[in-house]
Image: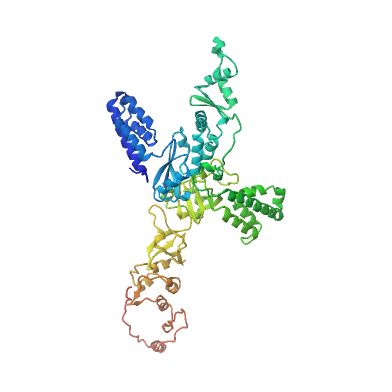
Amino acid sequence: MAKDNINQDMALDDATDLAFDIDVHLREHSSTYNSEHTEVMEAQENIADDIISGNFDNVKGLLTRYATQNEDFFKRLDEYRENFLQDTGPFSVLIYNKETQAEQWLSLPAKPERFEKLLNDIGLSKDASPEQYAVSGYVISYGDLADYIATGENVDELNYLAYLLKNLNSEELKIFLSAMEDEADIHSIENLINLAQNTDCYTLVDNMYDWDDYGKYVMEENGIDLRLLYDIEDYINFEQYGKDKAEERKAIMVDSAVLEKEQGPYTTYYDGNTAQIPDFCRITPIENDDSFIDDKIKRSMELANSLDRFFVAHDMDYAAKYPDGAMAMKLSESLYNGRTDYIKDMLADLGQTDDDVLPLELKEYEEKYIPVKYFIYQLKSGDDTRDFRFESLERLHSKGEFADKNNYDLIYSAAYMPSDTLEKLFQRFNIDIPQDFKGHSLSVSDIVVISGKGEEKAYYCDSVGFKEVPEFLDYIRIRSAVISNYEGYTALVGTDDKVYLGANENYHYMFDAPSYYDNSDKSVIHISDNHKMYSFLYGDGWVVSQQQMLENGAFTTENYAEFAELKTGVLSRLKCKKEITFAGEPFNYLANAEKHTEQNFNQIDGLINNEPPKPSIREQIKNSAKEHGEKKEPSKAPHKSEPEL
């Protein structure tokens, strides 16, 4: 079986089949196995988990301990490794192509050449954007480390961490794993990278099974020979002494050991900026070289100083609060990290427009140095949005609703770094919340928009992970739609009661949520604010006569007149599929409107409400007869119903 384009389902199926066969074999050859593994499904699942994770020694150990060394199963395990885990080592990641779903394992640490080959194998170019691929799974033999790393992490950061772990000795690795499992705030890729370089800040005391053991250890460390205590030892509370010393030394009990913390200064080697990753640990192309970073820092400081001088000169409160350039450093940091919204607000409050010098310089800075930004939106406060707060996307759809931008306020924005992922943003805005962030911690129903490099995408923070919601961006919410009489267009009525024509492929019918029109390409054509114009756009014409429509009030003469203007205006550039006829002739909407409006049929000229007509000869005779008291009535013409369209 070829390893290229691995199908994860196939790997799971093969592992499940192999685990089933091994379990059956063991039960047939070992009564001990049967008695110790009474839960058949649980036993098979454990074997399958070991196979999928590449822990073949565990599986081979079962075969050796409870039965004979079955060469057939050993061979099948080796084949599984070859087919599915050929490139996995102590630290391996599964990388997949987001478009084609092709995937392949990569053993870390890796070289750039190996990563380029993997990208080619899954159908991507060597300079593919991180938005085109993602990490979807891990096989990591370092304790429970895989449980503390989210999917979608930056590949360079993972390679950096794998390199550091590979170069730890056994004692350092044990300290790393012990500290990792204890420290609640250590579970982010940045903190794990720093922890791997700070193992000398900890001391691990082995063979400690309780605080009593630790109390005796500390006493002996202080030079007390416990053998000389004889029966006095029975009167000493070693457990309490051990607990007291643990608090003093910031020690914790871990698996069969005690970990003593902060034996030296804890150094931050990495703060999440991928530009700090050593070149020998980087496997993706360097997006920003050193000269670019230096240039960005320099320009951010220059612009910050200009902004600071302007604010001091034009804002008395600012000048009093931040004298002598005290704010310039914060402004520079904000510029570097892409947090420019509040700076724009400050400029606007002082009367600066988009055409003024500083706003223009700020715009140029963003275009050059902040190619990608993220924006956090949270629901507006108030009763109108109460029922939407903290609802999953499925629940929102079940209510006939979806993520409507009109219900949200923009809360925060900043630069989206190459090392950022949606999961890392979630961690940041729940654990390491920026000081200038004024919203609540990132939660279900919040929206994250990532914008840059010519595209913009919106993601809904769901009950599990994030889901893309294109309707949040440039869309029109639709309550009715029909194939129109104009080639390539669907007639639409928005929830705003406005009538539109839009490209057929841009209309999205949603069975379990409101339908919408994706207008990101600005293709929609606004027809009218009068919802009755919708019926004039039907592709199949009308099924009742004009006379009936007038009689039942479906249309007014004003409706006919409006559509006549649309026919010669916005609709004139579209290709009509079928001309609606009346009495065998193309229907003249304006003429029809005039016939029901004009007082003088001799004035059918395209203008409604001309001068009143002169009395006809018949009307003059009738009026004359009335004046002379005559009762004779004129003859009635036979009634003719208007033909249907």
| Location of residue 24 in the rendering, given as x and y in whole percent from the top left corner | 29, 31
Q: Is residue 290 or residue 34 the one in the foreground? A: 290
Residue 242, image quadrant: top right
Q: Quadrant of the N terminus?
A: top left
Q: Quadrant of the C terminus?
A: bottom left
| Location of residue 171 in the rendering, given as x and y in whole percent from the top left corner | 51, 28
How many numbered marks, from 0 up?
0
Q: Is residue 54 or residue 506 the one in the foreground? A: 54
Height in image: 627 above or below 382? below
Q: Is residue 426 or residue 331 the one in the foreground? A: 331
Height in image: 420 above or below 589? above
For the question of whether residue 175 can be seen, the reply is: yes
Q: Residue furthest left?
A: 28
Height in image: 472 above or below 90? below
Residue 275, image quadrant: top right
| Location of residue 418 in the rendering, given as x and y in whole percent from the top left corner | 52, 48
Kindly identify the residue that appears in the image at 62 percent across and 47 percent down. 333
For the question of whether residue 392 can be seen, the reply is: no
| Location of residue 249 in the rendering, given as x and y in whole percent from the top left corner | 59, 26
Q: Is residue 546 or residue 287 the one in the foreground? A: 287
Residue 2, image quadrant: top left
Height in image: 489 above or below 135? below
Q: Residue furthest front?
A: 113
Colouring convention used in this rendered image of the protein: rainbow
